[in-house]
Image (tube, rainbow, N blue to C red):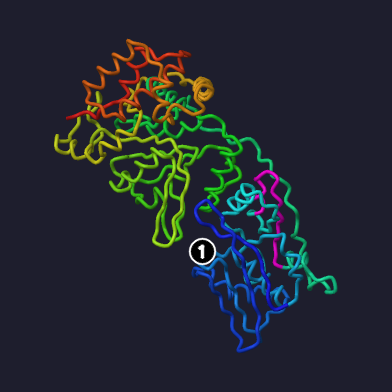
Amino acid sequence: MSLSLVRSRALVGLQAPAVTVEVHLANGLPSFTLVGLADVEVKEARERVRSALQNSGLEFPHNKRITVNLAPADLPKDSGRLDLPIALGILAASGQIDASQLADYEFAGELSLSGELRPVRGALAMSLVLRQQQVRTRLVLPPASAEEAALVPDAAVFRARHLLDVVQQFLPPSNEPPPEPSDGWARVAPTTPSAPGLYADLADVKGQAGVKRVLEIAAAGGHSLLMVGPPGSGKSMLAQRFAGLLPPMGIEDALESAAIASLAGRFDLSRWAQRPTGQPHHSASAVALVGGGSPPRPGEISLAHHGVLFLDELPEFPRAALEALREPLETGTITIARAARRAEFPARFQLIAAMNPCPCGYLGSATRACRCSPDQVSRYQGKLSGPLLDRIDLHIEVPSLPAQDLLTSPPGESTEAIAARSLAARERALARQGCANADLQGQAIDAQARLNDSATALLQKAAAKLGWSGRSVHRSLKVARTIADLAGSDTIEAAHVAEAVQYRRILKEH
């Protein structure tokens, strides 16, 4: 048979659209042509496949005109993931393996020149798409990638270490096995990862009881947070321990988070079901934060999906990068649009940001004098736009601790104790409305707020005096709802509103 079909998958966003590798062998001048909108890495498969077949003791059809079509033709294909299906297509078209046996399998893997199979990114995304589409196809993947794909419940995944391992499974009945086959073919049992790793403990942070209270509110309601304070006050330590306050990840959330990490080649089985904390450097571009490229790849906000995005030194980030966060903060998704293709990535993260109050960092400090001029302070704080600050629910000052308190204070309250209270409040909200308080939209805010008369009057007075936008009013109302849930109250009272109002902090003026 001079024509063969082998199935595989490409990567476009979090989706893994099907790709059919069509191989045709014809008489004529010897050539190896690869078509179907293939990127440079895919076109280089011609040399890898040729060498892998020859070094594995298999026959490469040198005297044939080889045409490989990657269908559909308008779908971009990148990376070396199509090496294995291309090699199998050539072997099937030349009659060295049984083409009819390949129909129930999908293949992905990069080939070394010796025929060894190397891991590919996005294996978990492939397996997850098969589950979502209820496709009963078996996956054949290299080591590491196969174990990753087997995390999906009920996935049928086979691991192959070498090209010969795959060839041996699909030999025609009349053929003898190729020389010296390795024993690397195996069905991968569904992986049951161990319990997620432990998070750093908030007990390491001494003092800062007020800030820990705000972290508890943020975790209970899913609210974003901005911490403002001098250098060394503990902002980074607090932010890096925040993920431990969030609820344990369910299987679906863990799979989705791991699939995004797999797309970027960052998947680590030891961090399974552990909420990610992304901490990009302040020199990161807008594309690095929100994603992009051709084909589009996830950015830091998507890699922090179901976790925490910590932006330290917030005003030092490029203005364009910060403004790109505005829509994902509202919608929980980011759409990367290009001329030929668009991709949508989930980006439901909790933003924890930190900044100094001025360029020198000591504006308002009780321990050191600020040396910045009013114009310098104004320019520094002006790097953050009003619309971005409006989307951050909680603003809190983090004061520096005197050396005596730092050295003599006992350990603070543990993450476990604070997380238990925030989880109880979040479960109360989920039972009432089916989502966290920060996710309430439209009429649901009015329906679930349940303000009493004194609370309503106080909120109206605060909004008028502080000149709040409608978004600020709604965000303070949702924070007050979370504070009421932490207190076990069905209605929002004046004390809850008063606490929420003080967290809509305006940056100090010099």
Which residue range is magenta in the image? 146-163
Q: What x and y, as percent, mark residue 170?
A: 77, 67
Say whether residue 156 is magenta. yes
Type of amino acid under label 1: Leu
Question: Quick one: quadrant of the C terminus?
Answer: top left
Image side of residue 467 versus residue 223, left or right: left
Q: Report the residue that reaches farthest toward the right.
A: 174
Question: Please, is residue 163 above or below residue 467 in the view?
Answer: below
Question: Quick one: quadrant of the N terminus?
Answer: bottom right
Q: Quadrant of residue 461?
A: top left
Q: What x and y, as percent, mark residue 257?
A: 54, 43
Q: Residue at x 23, y 37 (%)?
A: 381
Q: Report the residue that reaches farthest toward the top.
A: 454
Q: Residue at x 68, y 82 (%)?
A: 61
Q: Report the residue that reaches farthest toward the bottom.
A: 29
Q: Pointer 1: what residue?
A: 75
Image side of residue 25 versus residue 378, left or right: right
**Residue closest to the eye, 304 or 18:** 18
**Residue closest to the eye, 439 or 163:** 439
Q: What x and y, as percent, mark residue 11?
A: 54, 57
Q: Quadrant of residue 6?
A: bottom right
Say whether residue 231 is magenta. no
Dot 1: within a 10 Å radius of its alpha carbon, few (fewer than 14), some, or many (20 or more) residues? Answer: some
**Residue closest to the eye, 368 or 435:** 435
Q: What x and y, as percent, mark residue 407?
A: 40, 22
Image side of residue 266 versus residue 299, left or right: right
Q: Secondary structure at mark 1?
A: loop
